[in-house]
Amino acid sequence: MKHREAYIQRISDWLSVQPGQIELYWKGRVGLYALLKAFGVKEGDEVILPAFTCVVVPNAIIYCGAKPIYVDISPKTLNTTLDHIKQAITEQTKVIMVQNTFGLSNEVDEITAYAKSKGILTIEDCTHGFGGTFKDAPNGSYCDAAFYSTQWNKPFSTGIGGFAALNNVNYTQQFREVNSKLATPSRKDRYVLASLIQAKKYLLHDSTYWAALRLYRSLSKSGLVVGSSKGEELVDAKMPKNYFLRAVKVQEKVGEKALLNLAQALENRQQNGLQYNQFLKELGKWHYAEEDLLNHSFLNFPIFVKDKKAFQAAAEKEKIRLGDWFVSPIHPVMENFELWHLQPNDFPVALEKSNHILNLPTEPSNIHQVLDFLQNQADNLL
Ligand SMILES: Cc1ncc(COP(=O)(O)O)c(C=O)c1O
């Protein structure tokens, strides 16, 4: 079996979705765009999404000619709620996006049932949640479709990459037609990606993490390496050239292999996530409620701090691999929000959370080192 077929078969086994309903892409966001196109999203349509996401999500909506309609998040789960969504629905609402933030899904059953009753389609942004479950069903399976990311820090990695799974078989024809237009990434980009995957394997350690992160972000912003986001995707909502790209061999090969180790990685992350939660609860700091823990796959663990810069500097000194998702309601954009039809002040919870959020690794080389660090930094934790 070729790597592509074997990789798709493994995804299919995890999701219980037929292989023919799955497509692989150069990046996860391309999968979202393909699904929106397959659902016929066009000018005049509205798509509801959380105001606590990555800018490439509203980008895909705008590239279809539709308008993103943001809704605020719950301070408890960092996800949208059915109540928020209900208030944003209009005659123009074509799709509701449900996001699995940091690996947690909530209310997906209620949201999808309500959307169905209104004739609105649903897409789950499962970029953080492949392999996890919501009420014992694989993440992504409640909605009409879901898309997933396999970018560097995701549940499993192919460098950059992603895929989409279509659950609503009524759109199969449209999905295949849209996917038939995918182009192949350039030879240079394929080569650079393969080299980056090797470099990460051999060069990234706790001691090189902070320097490597800064270097990678700067090189990918300037377009010198294939990055998570090209500079142009962060400064305007216009579709870049060479956006609608299929996955390539190196991603299929690496993905097929990476899936073999996923169960162990998930188990490890879940245990560490639960340990962080208990520790922060005992410290009297922000933590998840008991009832949300079962549906959480803990890709990362969010924390909230008074002074981000001081906390990050202390983490760098201690060689702790901190993340900084989401620095704004449309990460990582910090200005010209009107280009994305967003007024950040309309979403006070998302704005407040993005001002204070950082995230802990759930696969640290030594969790006790991270717990000691949190204890020492307790005054800076919210
Ligand atoms: C919430 C969310 N949605 C979508 C994406 C896009 O995924 P990709 O980088 O694979 O296009 C990301 C990327 O990190 C994300 O965090």
Image (spheres, helix red, strand yellow):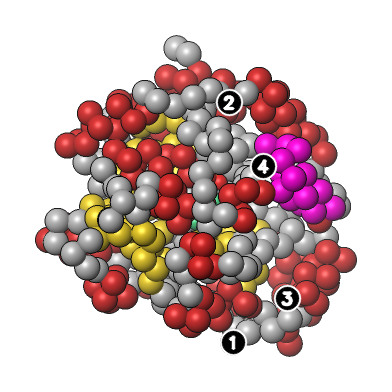
Q: Residue at x 45, y 12 (%)?
A: 1
Of the image marks 4 and 3, the number of the one nearer the N terminus: 4
- Span of residues in magenta: 211-227
Q: Mark 3 points at which residue?
A: 308
Among the 4 quarters of the image, the one containing residue 118: bottom left
128 versus 287 height, above or below: above
- Asked whether disc 1 touches disc 3, contact meaning CB atoms under 8 Å apart, the reply is no
Marks 2 and 1, how far apart at CA: 49 Å
291 versus 65 height, above or below: below
What is the x, y in percent for residue 363? 65, 53
Q: Tell me the tag on residue 85.
A: none
Amino acid identity at mark 3: Lys
Local SS, label 4: loop
Work out which quarter of the rendered image holds the C terminus and state it: bottom right
Of the image marks 1 and 4, the number of the one nearer the N terminus: 4
Q: Mark 2 points at which residue?
A: 185
Q: Can residue 36 be seen in this view?
A: yes
Local SS, label 1: loop
Please check the rendered image and state whether residue 225 is part of the magenta-colored stretch, yes or no: yes
